[in-house]
Amino acid sequence: MVPRYARPQMTALWEPEARFKIWFEIEAHATEKLGELGVVPESAAKALWDWWATNPAIDVPAIDAIEAVTKHDVIAFLTWVAEQVGDEARFMHQGMTSSDVLDTCLAVQLSRAADILIEDLDKLLEVIKRRAYEHKLTPTIGRSHGIHAEPVTFGLKMAEAYAEFSRCRARLVAAREEVATCAISGAVGTFANIDPRVEEHVAEKLGLAIEPVSTQVIPRDRHAMFFATLGVIASSIERLAVEVRHLQRTEVLEAEEYFSPGQKGSSAMPHKRNPVLTENLTGLARMVRSYALPAMENVALWHERDISHSSVERYIGPDATITLDFALGRLTGVIDKLLVYPERMMKNLDKMGGLVHSQRVLLALTQAGVSREDSYRYVQRNAMKVWESDGRLSLMELLKADPDVAAALTADQIEEKFNLDYHFRQVDTIFARVFGE
């Protein structure tokens, strides 16, 4: 985790003290149920909860010091708790294995991280929707292969992003549900030394589902799907960031990141206003995606368990969620303050002498009885003249002067095919599909 790209709420979830608190809750809830079942004295759980109520602080350095000797983090934690609670603590961890604690804790952390990310997505969606309606009918050029294609609106660009991040949200909700499972099933997952009702009790208390069948660990296909989903969300962040970066190029300059008073763009060139935030988002997206692959490689553990996944998850759990949380917050800020230039959009749209209306003329010629092959040839030969003139010539005027075109279409009919508003007739339909209004 790099502090530069981290926000406090998500970072706090992965701090050692937060992890140890979850471990304690798992152990205390399990001991509580074991007491109800008569496996251990009910006083054991009471002693744990009484101590917790008066001494909520976790002494992380003390636990680390014990681990330096035991070389085992869960044993170090249990030893430290026993030192605080006293004799009743010996009933903790009855019939459990370390993975019961570690995996259930990770499920809690990932589900809570997902809740933060879902909230991030909701904020982003709200901002995108506002900008979409603000520019619902702001004309701009659509591009394919980076080349002028046909007119769109900037609002449609935002509506497309809204639909994409809505899908991201739905995927994350599903991934959260899949990863939020509890396993308190003992060594190799057979419940030989612990009653399945303990698992049910802990799961209920922590807001998790029970794992239908575990080995000594929760199956890692669940985690692979979770981190893959984070990677897809990161890719969507990058797609929108790249769009902003392209629109901010000097030759385009249809939109740009907000440039605050006192901000500097270059140490050498005082005139520079660079898309540094969206470039940063592209880099962060690469990092989040990179965590998906090791999560997939974690699926193939040996037999009932090994710990090859453990070191991986100590990295990717915090880093992927913290980085994505930061990236979503940054993207929300970029779109919220994005500077949009409708006049420049119109200037660019008109730059190539009306070439963006070529398809309408092509279709009109075919409807007038000209073969598609001839229609394409008539329009293209005039369009290429405009292209080679860098837009100084007018496609409309060239078409009017072309005898083959004039034989099929009147001047008024040709002019009508250059009506910009025609391209926006279905914007309301698209918005209704996206926003449900």
Image (cartoon, grey):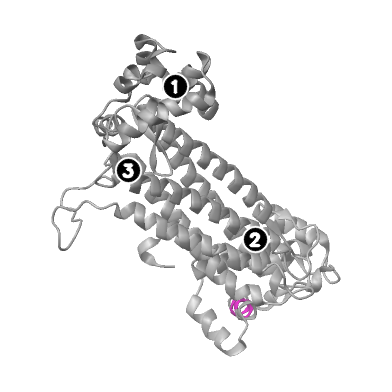
Residue closest to the eye, 64 or 31: 64
Instruction: State yes or no: residue 78 in magenta.
Output: yes
Query: Horizontally, is 415 left or right of 69 in the view?
Result: left
Q: Residue at x 64, y 72 (%)?
A: 309
Q: Does residue 47 appear in the picture of this structure?
A: no
Give residue 369's position: percent from left, percent from top. 53, 14
User: Could you tell me the amino acid type at mark 2?
Assistant: His
Per the picture, the main secondary structure of the magenta-coloured stretch is: helix
Of labels 2 and 1, the one closer to you: 1
Q: Residue furthest bottom?
A: 69
Q: Quadrant of residue 256?
A: top left
Query: Horizontally, is 13 left or right of 393 in the view?
Result: right
Q: Crowding near pointer 1: few (<14 within 10 Å), some, many (20+)?
A: some
Query: SS for tag 3?
Result: helix
Q: Crowding near pointer 2: few (<14 within 10 Å), some, many (20+)?
A: many
Relative height, residue 147 to residue 422 (above, below): below
Query: SS for tag 1?
Result: helix
Check residue 247 in the rendering and tell me which mark sits there, or answer none.
3
Relative height, residue 71 to residue 127 (above, below): below
Q: Which residue is mark 2?
A: 223
Of labels 3 and 2, the one closer to you: 3
Check residue 360 in the rendering and tell me which mark sits there, or answer none.
1
Query: SS for tag 2?
Result: helix
